[in-house]
C-alpha cells in the first residue's frame, strides 16, 4: 500500500469510528420503546416513541479545518438520498439530520440557506434551476468524454422533484456541526448517570469497547443493527457498566505517592501531646504527623476530584472510631500497676488501631491512610490511647 492509499484507508477508518460515536450518542439518549439503527435506513437512524424517524448522515473530515462548501459532494448526495427515502418510506414521519465535524462555509449559497433560521427554502428552490443550467453550460465547454461535475447528477435529481417533495424534505432537515468535540459530549452524557467527571473518560472507553464487540458479533451473524432500548441496556452491557462504575472502587493505592506536608506541626497540636504522653519519641511523632498531613490532603483531593464524598469520609471516620472502640475496650481489660504499664497498654491501643482493616465504598483503605486518619481523629479529640484520655484532655473540644 502506498502513502496515498494508506491515508485514504486511515480516513475511512476514522470515518467509521466517528459514525460509531454518533450512533453511541443516540443510543445513550434512547428511551424505552425506541430503536437506533446503524447502516439500516441511513448511516444512523432513530425511531422515536412519538412515531417520528430520524435519518442521520454522518460526514467526517480528517482535517480540523474541513469546510462544508456549496459544492460539497456529500451534501448534494445526501439531499438526493433523502428525497429517495421520502418517496420510499411513505407513511413515516421523517426527520433528517446532517451530522458533521466540518464547519459551514460563510459564502452565500445553499449551505447558508439551509442552516439559516428560518431555513430559506424559497431561495433554494429558486436557485436550483439556475445551478443546473450553470452546470450544463460548464459541461458543454468541456472536451467530449470528460467527466461531469460530480454534483451534477444530484442537482439534476433535485430539479426533477416536485416543489412539494422538496419542501417536505427541506422543512425537516437539521444540521449538527460538531464544534464541541463528540468525546466531551459523550462524557457529559455519562456524567448524567452519576459518573464522576474524573471517571467519565474511562467509563466511556468501557462503553465504547462493549459496543464495538457486540456490533462485531451482530455483523458476523449477518444481523441488522437495529438496536432497541433493552438490547442496548443489556446485551451491549450499558446498564452493567454504569452499575459497576457507580459501585466504583476508590484507588486508595494512590495514597502511597501522595507524601506532601501541610501546616501540621509535629511539635504542636493535641495529637502530638497524646503521643508524647505515652512515650512515643520525637522521630516517630514526626512520622505520624506526615501521615496525618498526607491522608488529610489526599482525601481533600479525592473529594475535589469527585471520587470521594463528604458522606463517604464521614463513614470512613465512623468505621475508624468503631474499630478503635472495640480495640480500646479489649485492650483495657488488662490492668496496669504503674505509668510504665499504662504507657505500654496505650501504645498497644495505638498500634492496633492504625493496623486495623477498613473498607469504604467497596474499597480496602490503604494502611498509611488509616494511620493518618487515626492521628487526625486523636487531634480532634474523638479518640485517644490512654485509658483516662477523656478526662486528661477534656479541655480540648472536638469538631
Image (spheres, rainbow, N blue to C red):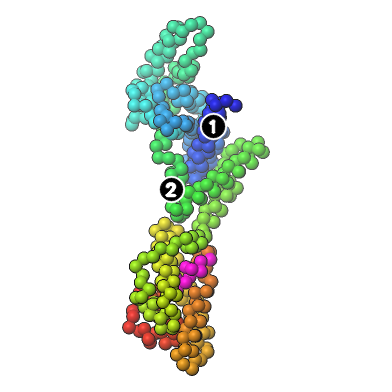
Residue 15, how many percent across, how many down?
51, 33
The region drawn magenta spans 364-375
- Residue in the foreground of this view, choosing between 235 and 48: 235
User: Local crowd at mark 2 within 10 Å, few (<14), some, or many (≥20)?
Assistant: some
Residue 98 visible at all: no
Q: Quadrant of residue 311?
A: bottom left
Residue extending farthest to the right is 221
Where is residue 60 shown, x and y percent of the image? 47, 32
In this figure, which residue is indicated by the disc labeled 1? 10
Label 2 belongs to which residue? 188
What SS does tag 1 mark? helix
Q: Nearer the viewer, mark 1 or mark 2?
A: 1
Q: Secondary structure at mark 2?
A: helix
Residue drawn at x 51%, y 27% is 85
Dominant secondary structure of the residues highlighted in magenta in the image: helix
Q: Nearer the viewer, residue 217 or 67?
A: 67
Which one is earlier in the sequence, the residue at label 1 or at label 2? Answer: 1
Say if the magenta span includes residue 158. no
C-beta proximity under 8 Å, tags 1 and 2: no
**Residue 382 image offset from top left, x and y in percent:** 40, 78
Describe residue 285's horizontal placement relative to residue 91 as left or right: left
Residue 177's place in the image compared with 358, above or below, is above
* Residue occupying the point 51% across, 42% down: 24
Q: At x 52% / y 88%, what residue is drawn?
A: 333
Q: Residue at x 41, y 83 (%)?
A: 277
Position above or below: 116 against 385: above
Label 1 and label 2: CA atoms lie apart by 28 Å
Q: Is residue 168 above or below residue 47?
A: above
Location of the C terminus (image quadrant): bottom left
Quarter holding the N terminus?
A: top right
Q: How many marks?
A: 2
Amino acid at each position: 500500500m502506498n502513502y496515498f492509499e494508506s491515508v485514504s484507508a486511515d480516513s475511512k477508518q476514522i470515518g467509521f469510528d466517528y459514525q460509531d460515536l454518533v450512533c453511541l450518542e443516540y443510543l445513550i439518549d434512547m428511551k424505552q420503546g425506541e430503536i437506533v439503527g446503524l447502516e439500516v435506513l441511513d448511516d444512523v437512524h432513530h425511531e422515536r416513541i412519538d412515531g417520528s424517524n430520524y435519518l442521520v448522515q454522518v460526514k467526517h473530515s480528517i482535517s480540523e479545518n474541513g469546510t462544508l462548501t456549496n459544492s460539497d459532494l456529500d451534501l448534494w448526495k445526501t439531499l438526493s438520498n433523502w428525497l429517495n427515502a421520502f418517496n420510499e418510506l411513505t407513511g413515516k414521519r421523517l426527520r433528517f439530520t446532517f451530522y458533521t465535524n466540518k464547519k459551514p462555509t460563510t459564502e452565500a449559497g445553499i449551505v447558508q440557506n439551509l442552516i439559516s433560521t428560518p431555513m430559506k427554502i424559497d431561495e433554494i428552490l429558486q436557485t436550483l434551476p439556475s445551478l443546473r443550467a450553470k452546470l450544463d453550460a460548464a459541461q458543454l465547454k468541456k472536451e467530449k468524454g470528460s467527466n461531469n461535475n460530480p454534483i451534477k447528477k444530484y442537482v439534476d435529481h433535485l430539479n426533477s422533484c416536485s416543489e412539494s417533495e422538496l419542501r417536505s424534505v427541506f422543512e425537516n432537515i437539521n444540521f449538527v456541526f460538531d464544534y464541541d468535540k463528540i468525546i466531551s459530549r459523550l462524557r457529559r452524557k455519562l456524567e448524567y448517570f452519576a459518573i464522576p467527571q474524573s471517571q467519565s473518560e474511562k467509563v466511556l472507553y468501557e462503553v465504547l469497547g462493549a459496543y464495538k464487540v457486540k456490533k462485531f458479533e451482530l455483523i458476523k451473524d449477518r444481523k441488522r443493527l437495529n438496536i432497541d432500548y433493552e438490547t442496548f441496556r443489556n446485551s451491549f452491557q450499558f446498564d452493567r457498566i454504569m452499575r459497576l462504575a457507580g459501585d466504583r472502587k476508590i484507588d486508595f493505592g494512590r495514597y502511597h505517592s501522595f507524601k506532601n506536608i501541610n501546616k501540621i506541626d509535629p511539635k504542636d497540636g493535641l495529637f502530638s501531646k497524646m503521643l508524647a504522653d505515652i512515650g512515643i519519641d520525637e522521630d516517630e511523632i514526626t512520622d505520624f504527623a506526615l501521615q496525618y498531613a498526607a491522608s488529610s490532603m489526599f482525601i481533600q483531593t479525592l473529594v475535589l476530584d469527585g471520587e470521594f464524598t463528604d458522606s463517604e469520609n464521614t463513614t470512613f471516620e465512623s468505621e475508624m472510631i468503631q474499630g478503635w472502640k472495640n480495640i480500646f475496650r479489649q485492650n483495657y481489660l488488662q490492668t496496669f500497676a504503674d505509668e510504665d504499664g499504662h504507657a505500654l497498654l496505650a501504645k498497644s491501643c495505638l498500634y492496633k488501631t492504625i493496623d486495623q482493616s477498613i473498607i469504604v465504598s467497596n474499597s480496602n483503605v490503604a494502611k498509611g491512610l488509616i494511620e493518618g486518619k487515626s492521628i487526625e481523629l486523636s487531634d480532634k479529640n474523638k479518640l485517644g490511647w490512654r485509658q483516662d484520655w477523656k478526662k486528661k484532655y477534656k479541655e480540648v473540644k472536638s469538631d
